[in-house]
Amino acid sequence: MLHTLAVLVENHPGVLIKVAGLFARRAYNIESLTVCQTEDPEVSRMTIVVAGDDQVIEQVRNQLSKLVVVHSVVDLTEKSVVDRELALVRIPINSETRSEVFQTVDVFRGRVVDMGRSNITVELTGDIDKIDAFVHALRPYGLLELVRTGKIAIMRSEA
Amino acid sequence: MSEEKKGLSGAKLLLDALREEGVDIIFGYPGGVLLPLYDAMLDSPIRHVLGRHEQGVVFAADGYARVSGKVGVCLATSGPGATNLVTGITNAYSDSIPLVVLTGQVPTSSLGSDSFQEVDIIGITMPITKHSYIVKDPRDLPRVVKEAFFLARTGRPGPVVIDLPKDVLAQENVEPFPSDMKLKGYKIFGRGNNSKIEEVAQALSEARKPVLYAGGGVVTANAEEVLRQFAERANLPVVTTLMGIGSLPYGHPNLLGMVGMHGTVTANYTVDDCDLLIAVGVRFDDRVTSGLGHRFATKAKVIHMDIDPVEISKVVKTHMRIVGDARKILEELLEVLPGHSLPDLSEWWGQIRNWQKDNPLGCDLDSLTPQLVVKTLGELAGGEAVIATDVGQHQMWVAQFYPIAHMRNYATSCGLGVMGYGLPAAVGAQLARPQDNVFLITGDGSLQMSIQELGTVAQNKLPIKIILLNNGVLGMVRQMQKMFYDGRYNHIQLEGNPDFVKVAEAYGIRGIHVNSVDQVRGAIEEAVNSSGPILLDFKISPDENVLPLVPPGKVITEMIVR
Ligand SMILES: Cc1cc2nc3c(=O)[nH]c(=O)nc-3n(C[C@H](O)[C@H](O)[C@H](O)COP(=O)(O)OP(=O)(O)OC[C@H]3O[C@@H](n4cnc5c(N)ncnc54)[C@H](O)[C@@H]3O)c2cc1C
Ligand SMILES: Cc1ncc(C[n+]2csc(CCOP(=O)(O)OP(=O)(O)O)c2C)c(N)n1
């Protein structure tokens, strides 16, 4: 099962390699990993999506916590969270496909951010499922390029 | 503090910070980028001991740490000096030994340019250190040193590397930053959990066949005394790992010996048959479980007490976990014990005594066997002596037959099992415990991996006694070839061995050949009473086996015993 871990780490060079090295060495599977700044300039936040059964996930959490550069590890999987991913997709268009492509983009509430003579680039934000569905819907037209940020997530505030 | 430190060089700041951590000795080997540090050392009260190879200096620091309980410190220059440390750092990491490892580095301005003797030692050692630092601003030195020692010795101990660019050491007039530690992400699990302690006591009172499985964490926690009290109070049988040897003194009636691949039959049967396994400071290594965690102590409820949450349920499914320091946990347990009835274990002990009677550790004491040597040494030198070993058959004979009385009297490489550890570890041990008799028990293969450290012994006039069990072969590998590869021996013969007595003599160290059984006792007596270093070269048969042995892939009750 996929778990989403929010990991607060020291904002130093070398921290990413420590975390990545740990995953590689212990043969944990990273599905995606994002790193970004936080409200505290000394702390970065990694959002790591990792696959594994409960025992593996517990090992991952404990191993991560053990790194001196890691301040905290929270498993967001069972929690109520808002999660998002951003994708940029370049799709070929021609006179025949043009309107269908635009329709699809509309249905998913994508935004056209660039337009060439024979292709368009679309920005789409949403949860992973939505982006997967979008990519799936566009595949028949031929994807020229696909860039995804990986998931970021935040816990919902208490009502 | 910053007042008085004003105007110091980076090197002096470093040495002062080391002093503040109580460092009295550094094992080191110099080189170009370390010149500012070596120069400053002339004015420092810290003693520097020059090894003969950087692997020797890190092993010496490790031996020093094991027998003293303090943090060992070693130093090597950039590039080849630093890479020569790698095996030693790994060894300390595998066995959770506290070290602070100082490496020289090229000047900060040259970093990343493939300059002469530049190597990314932080990158190389990342998987084998608890933490590491490269100091790019000399003002950080006091804080970094303080943090490094704190990290090395607290929680689950381990090696910490500090990489020191030459300009950082050389800079003059440094006004240091405050040394306050900034370790927001570091978690130490100090104590147990009271409600859990009650549960343990409860489980114990309900058990019929309990056993205590003690390991290196008992050593780290200095929990020898409380472990003994607990075992005696609850009348528990105790098995130890190789790392945990000495947590009960050899010969203690509750001690069943080592568990695992070369453990005693009784220890292995007891663990296999128990209904309650109380594991303290152990990590269920595959030398113990045969890599078959799911077939280990299958009838037992498993209670695991460990300071590192990662170890719990890593190999064997744990029913009750207590994360914390072994000594504190055992102390709490001892406190609540009077509130619980203790189980009647007479039937269990009856069973155990029968196993012991039927399966004594066998050995031939009528000819010049390694077991005879180890036992005679044990008789004459006793449990109070400090024992260092190398890796191989001789290491196992020591584990089985030497009467180690205290856990800090013993230095052996376990998790990494690295040949060449013994002699430099003995150097470190002797320097840590100058009043004690230090013996190295080694093999002719292992000794030759560090034989140059005889120079360190000679230079420092260290009265180390070397017991060489010389079988002319890589005995442990030969035994495997004999048992599991139909005796198709190859590349285990150490033809071309030198005369080790002459080698010792070349270093100004006395040596004695021991070629027959009637010379054994006399020679060992001489060594025990010798005020200087001495090497005894015991000629033993290459055909001796270490038994019992659990063959690869078998569970721990499936032992070969003869
Ligand atoms: C040739 C050879 C043969 C070997 N054969 C055997 C054998 O037959 N049997 C055997 O047992 N070993 C054997 N070994 C050694 C084996 O490889 C392991 O190194 C050893 O079993 C590990 O010991 P341990 O479980 O005590 O763990 P250690 O490596 O000593 O780890 C210590 C554990 O205690 C924890 N800890 C640390 N500090 C504390 C604290 N303050 N409080 C609580 N917990 C703490 C740590 O987190 C860790 O889990 C052999 C080695 C060699 C080289
Ligand atoms: C550095 C290193 N290389 C190889 C090994 C594999 N190995 C384990 S025991 C052993 C033989 C040891 O021979 P010796 O030191 O003579 O001791 P003996 O087994 O004969 O007592 C070897 C080669 C090792 N443990 N360490």
Image (cartoon, rainbow, N blue to C red):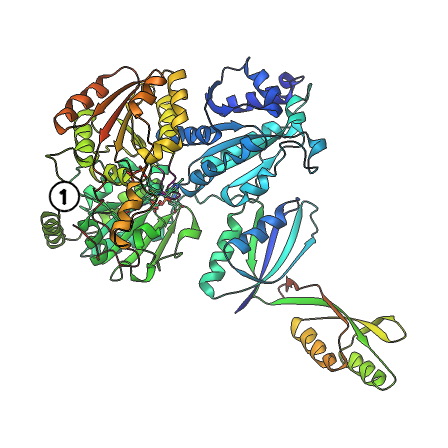
Residue carrying label 1: B362
State the residue lying farthest toward the top. B43
Q: Main secondary structure of the magenta part?
A: loop
State the residue lying farthest toward the right. A117
Quadrant of the drawing holding the N terminus of chain B: top right
Q: From this viewpoint, is residue B416 visible?
A: yes
Which stretch is magenta?
Answer: B413-419
Q: Mark 1 lies on which chain?
A: B
Quadrant assignment, res A127? bottom right
Q: From this viewpoint, is residue B241 visible?
A: no
Left or right placement of residue B191 versus residue B435 in this view: right
Residue A140 horizontal/vertical position (percent): 73, 82
Return the residue nearer the eye: A103 or B110: B110
Residue ID at (52%, 27%): B75
Residue ID at (80%, 80%): A106
Quadrant assignment, res B31? top right
